[in-house]
Image (cartoon, rainbow, N blue to C red):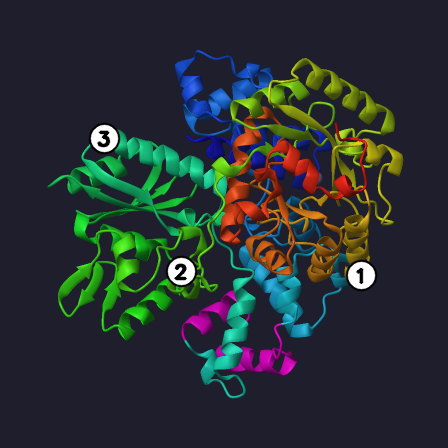
Amino acid sequence: MQNPDIARLFDEVADLLEIQDANPFRVRAYRNAARTIRDFPEPIADLVRAGTKDLTDIAGIGDDLAEKITDIVTTGELPLRKQLASKLPAGLLDLLRISGLGPKRVKLLYKKLKVKSGDDLAEKITDIVTTGELPLRKQLASKLPAGLLDLLRISGLGPKRVKLLYKKLKVKSAADLAKALEAGKIQKLKGFGPKMEEKIRVGLGQVHVGERRLLLNEAETQATAIVAYLEAGGGLRQIEVAGSYRRRRETVGDLDIVVTSERESSAKVMDRFVAYGDVAEIISKGETRATVKLRGGLQVDLRAVEPDAYGAALLYFTGSKAHNIELRKIAQEKSYKLNEYGLFKGTRRAAGKTEQEIYAKLGLEWIPPELREARGEVALAREHRLPNLVDVADIRGDLQMHTSATDGKGTIEDMAHAARALGYQYIAITDHSKRVTMALGLDTKRLREQWRAIDELNAHSRGGGFTILKSVELDILESGKLDLPDDVLAEADYVVATIHYGINQTEKELTRRLVGAAEHEWVDAIGHPTGRLVGKREPYAFDFEALCRACTATGCLLELNGHPERMDLPDTLAAAAKQHGVRFVLSTDSHQPGNLPFMKYAVYLARRAGLEAGDILNTRSLEEFRAALKRAARGGKGRQ
Ligand SMILES: [Zn+2]
């Protein structure tokens, strides 16, 4: 049992409690427990088994939770979860896995529409599509996920076509519609055709009930554990986890592991693989390939390939599909054939051992996996113009983190201590400002007290080569005003402004708030700029270009927030911002010292966006960082 598996059970308890209208504090307690466990740096199951560490020593875990964790590790189940789940229809938990459908929305669907499963939901959507209206639509509209409303708008699917689908194909639900689509019946209907088929496919895809994709850090926990397990068995020469995991996408659907083994030992590797402790189901097993499903639902594929084909297999299984298609096209132009076994001229393998030699034969520089998305990287590789991507080792400071003064779980010293251990030169303590009452946000008085404490800590360690920056995560209020007065902001070393409330305002209002903050003289950066929560909440609707223009004009920075639940800016937007000439800061939004290593996720995001160290201000020394801030030009008092 890995930490994400344990965390998932607690998350489900929180979901189930929320659907059943339990006390919100109780819901929050389980939610926080899930986060603490998910983000905990060591495998908790090992701690329980070793019995050497008292779980209650972990911040946020009391006696009750410690007992529940021990139950989970020893029995694989949480009795409370079972008990809660038994009171609700079984399909409801599946609904929770639909991206965008959180417990609040599931509760509404269940209570108001009697939606109990994915099929029910599909049917209701069909009702909406058929009649064009649903009595509760208005009431629900603001609370429904974007995907549902998109379906409503599957353009061209008006009442007439729905009637046809029903009469000719007996399509009564979205599920039926999907089946008809699969069977190729739709495009044969009069008035439909391939274009309409594609539209429906896209629309249906958005409500597809499937396994939840893992957050990148959850996938990493699983991948690291399984690779360590396979390596411990011996007989391996090379091992790599390919797929979207290797491309460091913010979510991962399954794991594709590619290995080469010592002579004759691939069957042994397969045996060991399917005997892995977290395997719930062996889907298939052969001499060179096996597929299993882990307890948390994650599918893992293992392929053993011959050393001469390792690079080709890695390339093939890393993807993306679109990238591979571009490579195959180039191969064809050079009269090669590229597949998972190698690059062939006729029957002769011209390359395959490493990715580098395959790219080289195609006349390309080796392309880092994070860039393999068919977004222009192949052309850059041909012209030897690939960016020199930023690396974790380039980062000298972390610019968003919270302490126990608000919703974090460590003191300023705890955070500083952990940051020094990572080799940083500086950190910014960015507790919430007062508007975020839920997190006990700081008012002027408490913030100034915190800054005095920081001054003292810095004075004590002067010459130690480490500095704590006086900062704040400043709320951009619904009105567009900032949550703290200018004279206070002027005293800070660095201010990151963010939106937490009023996220459903109009595009115009949201744009005005963000642009206004970016233009404010004491705002140095906009934090988690789109507000997206991976798999849970889409970016807010605002004019991103307008924000970029404001940032370039004023020198305001955009944050790449590497918290695995945020990963904000999304990679494509970060790439677009770079085109505008925007500069960036990377941060972890840590809520405990153990979160600071999340910096790698911010770096992955930056790499996927094609960013170099020069694009990112916290790759610079403290002096250079300070000098490059907008406030430096204004003579901010925070400078020493
Ligand atoms: Zn925030």
Q: Secondary structure at mark 1?
A: helix
Please name the residue that numbered disc 1 is placed on: 508
Mark 1 or mark 2, earlier in chain? 2
Judge by depth and name the residue closer to the eye, 144 or 227: 227
Q: Residue at x 68, y 42 (%)?
A: 628
Ligand 1's quadrant: top right
Above/below status of 304 relative to 330: above
Judge by depth and name the residue closer to the eye, 56 or 382: 382
Q: Is residue 358 visible?
A: yes
Label 2 near ligand 1 (CB < 8 Å): no
Q: Residue at x 68, y 47 (%)?
A: 557
Q: Main secondary structure of the magenta part?
A: helix
- Report the residue that reaches farthest toward the bottom: 190
Q: Quadrant of residue 240?
A: top left
**Disc ID at residue 517:** none
Q: Is residue 584 magenta?
A: no
Across and down, in percent, residue 92 comes to: 57, 47
Mark 2: give few (<14), some (14-19) or many (20+) Cα within 10 Å. few
Q: Is residue 175 magenta?
A: yes
Which corner quadrant holds the C terminus? top right
Please name the residue that numbered disc 2 is placed on: 384
Q: Amino acid at mark 3?
A: Gly
**Disc ID at residue 233:** 3
In the figure, is residue 247 to the left or right of 571? left
Mark 1: give few (<14), some (14-19) or many (20+) Cα within 10 Å. few
Bounds of the magenta segment = 154-183
3D distance between C-alphas at marks 3 and 1:
58 Å
